[in-house]
Image (cartoon, grey):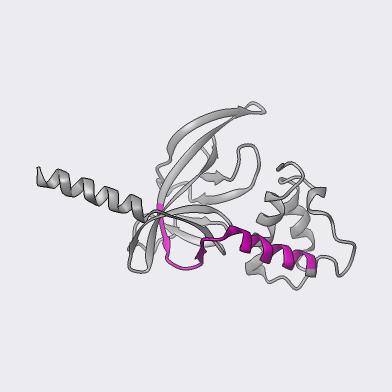
Amino acid sequence: MFSRIFAFIAAMGSLAFAQTQYATTVKPLYADAKSEKVIGKLLPTAKVEVLKTDGKRVLISIEGFQEEAKPAIYFVAGKRILNAGFDGKAGVKFEKLDSQEIDEKIYNKVKVQVWTDNADLVNDVEALYAQAKDMYEQNCSMCHGLHPVKEFTANQWPSMFKAMAGRTGIEKKDYFLVIQYLQKNAKDMQ
C-alpha cells in the first residue's frame, strides 16, 4: 500500500518538475544519465520537456514527427526541420502518439525520452530566434541584398544557407541555430 502511495507521489513530483526548455546549440543525446556514448543530437530551438535531473544530466522528452521508420524527429510533418537525429543502431524507443499521411508518406507523431547535458537549455525560444535573426541580417547582407526569410521554403533554406555560410562571419557552431530560424519562419510555415 505504502509503495503505491510513494510511487504516486513520486510521479506527481516529476510531473510538477517538467519544464519546457529549448536547446541553444547542437546537444548530444544519451541513453541514460551515466553513459558517455552519444546516441543522437538535439538541434537548436528544439522544444523539450525536462523531466528529471541527475547530476550534470537531464532526462528530456522530445515530441515531433517521424517519417516511417527513420531515426529522426522533425518539427512538423512533411518538412525537413530536424528537432533530433539518432543513430539508427542505438535502439531508441519512439512512443507513437498519432499518424498522418502527407504526399503519400506516413508521418507518425512520436515522443521519446533521452538524456542530455544540463547546459545550453533556455526557456525563451523567442530570444534564440532574435539572436539568429540578428546573425542572419548582420552577415548575409554583406555581399548581396538580404533574402527575405519568406523567400524560400523550409526545405530549401538549409542548402541556400550552407552554400553561402562559409563566406560570412557566422561561426560554424551557430549554423544550425540560423538554419532553424530560417526554416521555422519560411514561406511555407504560415
Residue 126 in sight = yes
Q: Nearer the viewer, residue 102 or 122?
A: 122
> At 75% across and 64% down in the image, what residue appears?
136
Q: Is residue 120 magenta?
A: yes
Query: Measured from the top left, where is residue 160 in percent x and y?
Result: 78, 54
> At 84% across and 56% down in the image, what residue appears?
147
Looking at the image, is 174 positioned above or below residue 75? below
Q: Which of 104 and 61 is in front in this view?
A: 61
> At 56% across and 61% down in the image, what residue appears?
124
Residue 167 in sight = no
Looking at the image, is 51 positioned above or below residue 144? above
Q: Quadrant of the C terminus?
A: top right
Q: How many labels does the image show?
A: 0
Magenta stretch bounds: 114-137
Q: Nearer the viewer, residue 169 or 91?
A: 169
Farthest residue, direction left: 1
Query: Measured from the top left, where is residue 148 in percent x and y?
Result: 83, 54
Q: Quadrant of residue 100?
A: top right
Asked if residue 136 lies left or right of residue 117, the reply is: right
Q: Quadrant of residue 56?
A: bottom left
Q: In which quarter of the image is residue 164?
A: bottom right
> At 55% across and 62% down in the image, what residue appears?
26
Q: Is residue 61 magenta?
A: no
Q: In which quarter of the image is the N terminus?
A: top left
Asked if residue 73 lies left or right of residue 159, the reply is: left
Query: Measured from the top left, where is residue 122 in percent x and y?
Result: 52, 63
Query: Measured from the top left, where is residue 152 in percent x and y?
Result: 79, 47
